[in-house]
Amino acid sequence: MNYEEWRNELFGQPPEMRPALFEHCPEFYRVPPNQAFDYIDRVLVDPEVHTLFSKDQLGNGINTIYSLNCSDLPSLYKTEGDEARRIRGIENLISLYKNYFERYCTGAVKSIGNDNTDGSMGYICYMFWDVFILYPGNATPAMINATLRVMRMALESHNDNCLTSAIHGLGHKVRYVPEASRILQQWLLRPTTKNPEILQYAQIATTGMIN
């Protein structure tokens, strides 16, 4: 299955369906793991997807890639290739923020975790680091550091939803990786938003006491 066929199968499902219920064609599941990992990296920077598919279809596809409730694809970040390949895949997640979350997660952040204005894309944006397969204890220190670099770069955004996503992820890592708190504290010195809800959330996140 070539890349375009795989991409179209990933995103071309009915937008009203839940990703966990998708039944993709047999060829989709037969793509070798190393090739599927390469396809994921490619889809994060593919400009065509934004002209071919709706926001809901794209959101469902991104959920399929990153939620174990929807597919086995997230396991590629844990098992495929050597450490250097996995780190490269993790670092490519900044393109997920820039090309998907910044573009489609445009709803106002008024109450952290309770806004559903951006559909499945908004859900995976906020919950990304909750559902992402890697966490301290099941990944190497270098891989965890790569996730921190992605979150630090996401904090450079001026999109409130991207900021909330990164703050949420860092807050969950504070208890295990002290660097996460330092990243948040540094950002609070020069925040990229004036949204009081997000600033308060970031302050709480420095302690690790978030849901």
Image (tube, rainbow, N blue to C red):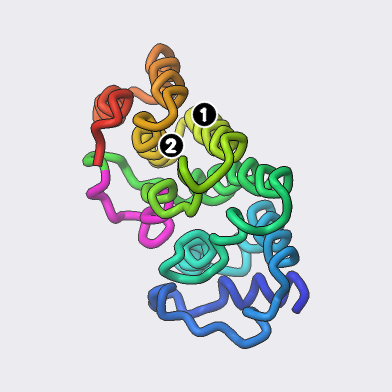
The mark that comes first in sequence, 2 or 1, is 1
Q: What residue do we see at 68% from left, 55% from top?
A: 41
| Residue sitting nearer the eye, 16 or 68 | 68
* Secondary structure of residue under mark 1: helix
* Secondary structure of residue under mark 2: helix
Q: What residue do we see at 35% from left, 30% from top?
A: 175
Instruction: Identify residue for label 1.
Output: 152
Are the residues flagged by discs 2 and 1 in contact, CB closer than 8 Å? yes
Name the quarter where the C terminus is drawn: top left
Q: Residues within 10 Å of mark 1 (few under 14, many from 20)?
A: many
Q: Is residue 47 visible?
A: no
Taking the view exactly as shown, the residue that stands out farthest to the front is 137
Which amino acid type is marked by label 2?
Ala
Magenta-colored stretch includes residue 151: no
Q: Residues within 10 Å of mark 2 (few under 14, many from 20)?
A: many
Q: Is residue 53 above or below residue 104?
A: below
The dot on residue 166 is 2
Magenta-colored stretch includes residue 114: yes
Start and end of the magenta stretch?
113-125
Which amino acid type is marked by label 1?
Arg
Q: What residue do we see at 37% from left, 29% from top?
A: 174
Q: What residue do we see at 66% from left, 43% from top?
A: 87
